[in-house]
Image: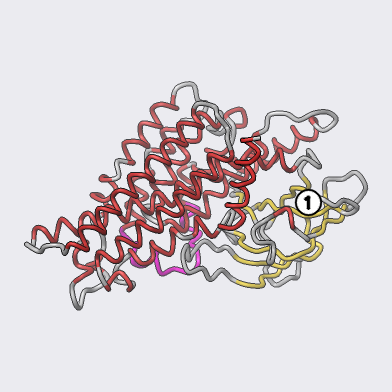
Amino acid sequence: MLASCMVVGVTRQSLEVDVSRAIHHAALPHRLLACARLHHKGCSMHIATILEPIPQLAQTWAAARADRQQRTVADPADYAQLRRIGVPLLAVPVEFGGTWESLAQSARPICTLLRTLAQGDPSITLSSAMHHGVLGSWRIPSVPEPYNAAWQQQRQEVFQSVLDGAWWGTIVSEPGSGGDSSKTRAQCLPERPGSLKYRMSGPKHFGSGSGLTSFMTTRAVPEGETTPDLFFLEVRNHPWDGSTGMRLTAPWRGHGMRSTNSHAFEFANFPATRVAWPGHQAEIMAAGSSLGGMSFSSVIVGVVDAAMDYTRQWLKTRRQQGARLSAYQQVEWTLAEQEAFLIERAWEGTLQTLEQGQLNRRTVLMTKECIARLSESVLSHLCTLTGGTAYTWYCPLGAWLQDVQALGYLRPPWALAFDNLYTMGIQEDA
């Protein structure tokens, strides 16, 4: 049980959380099933069938938390489980055989699913979450002529790949860019004039889901141009020794989110496909940015849920044993509750904004940064409240503290995020 993390000589097995109780406390199964019922009517795919198994899967993952938190490599079996349930289809529009209807209708089911799964394993949840965001580029129904025919064909091919079992991810970032993909220096050479088929060369890192995804989106500068454009790479079945143009340069070694497989690679003359609306990467990437930001935030909110439930049960057990909290511990818990309350309000409020059809990238980024700061503070309070064992692998709180820090350091990192918020604010006030 939870309180056992403070007992001297405790075994890892005795540290397992009563996960069914913990997941229940967060009330997420009820929210998830409500989403399923709400979106079941009129949807060509049975979305309820996808969402209903998710709470049980989160419990199964959480039951193995002590082992999962120490993994440094993702397990393909987890992606296979999600595929069997049908999770990848949530990103595919209804007309192509998936469940996606619109951002207003589909954001909540996806974000609630991610929040639920993250209580069990945030690493695998975060890496798989990239799939839903990057496919937003092709959820644009049509583009101006003369590109629309090629666009429709590419949309069909992209979404058919998901129906055939493919996972999508992203490997946009480059060393030295500070997270700003507009500074990419990777180069793409066309295989022949007028073709969307290119060859890409250059370093990339933070490729979440490497080895699990079939396709990855990226940015590179086409030959003869000065501005990066959007491309995608078919990375499945390629060795990482450089023999086909994809060489592993640094396996992922994150302090948190340890098993996301966010590896770094050097690409050399590697096949790449340009998006079929060339020169409009800003509009295309904006189509998925709101869901991408909220997806990442939802994973972190799920970690906060798990940490609060863990500590709540720890406190209950101590009370049952007749132990009393010091004044300091009481303050730490009260502060954690207040900040978790604010996280919930930020998450819920932004989802409601999306449901109302208000696509505001600044609101989503503001929510991400607020949750990033608050979640780190919540976990710090919980770690100091429970004591020194939180600094060890015998208690999950220390690992969760490292996990939630990912939201601030990545996609985009702190400095770039705050620069963007300031610039967006000035533009809104103009």
| Residue for badge 1 | 228
For disc 1, the neighbor class at 10 Å (few under 14, some 14 to 19, many from 20) is many
Residue at 56%, 49% in the rendered image? 130
Magenta part of the chain? 63-80
Q: Secondary structure at mark 1?
A: loop
Q: Position of residue 151 (x, y in %)?
A: 76, 35
Residue at 41%, 69% in the rendered image? 70
> Farthest top residue?
42
Q: Is residue 129 above or below residue 141?
A: below
Q: What amino acid type is highlighted by mark number 1?
A: Pro
> Farthest right residue?
193
Residue 195 located within the stretch drawn in magenta: no
Q: Position of residue 218 (x, y in %)?
A: 70, 53
| Colouring rule applied to residues | secondary structure
**The C terminus sits in image quarter:** top right
Residue at 91%, 50% in the rendered image? 192
Give the tally of numbered discs: 1
Residue situated in front as seen by the camera: 159 or 227: 227
390 left or right of 162 in image: left
Residue situated in front as seen by the camera: 426 or 19: 426
Residue at 77%, 53% in the rendered image? 272
Q: Position of residue 378 (x, y in %)?
A: 35, 56
Query: Would you identify the image quadrant in which residue 174 lies?
Result: bottom right
Q: Is residue 415 above or below residue 24?
A: below
Query: Would you identify the image quadrant in which residue 320 lies?
Result: bottom left
Q: Is residue 90 above or below residue 172?
A: above
34 left or right of 351 in image: left
91 left or right of 400 in image: right
Q: Position of residue 194 (x, y in %)?
A: 90, 43
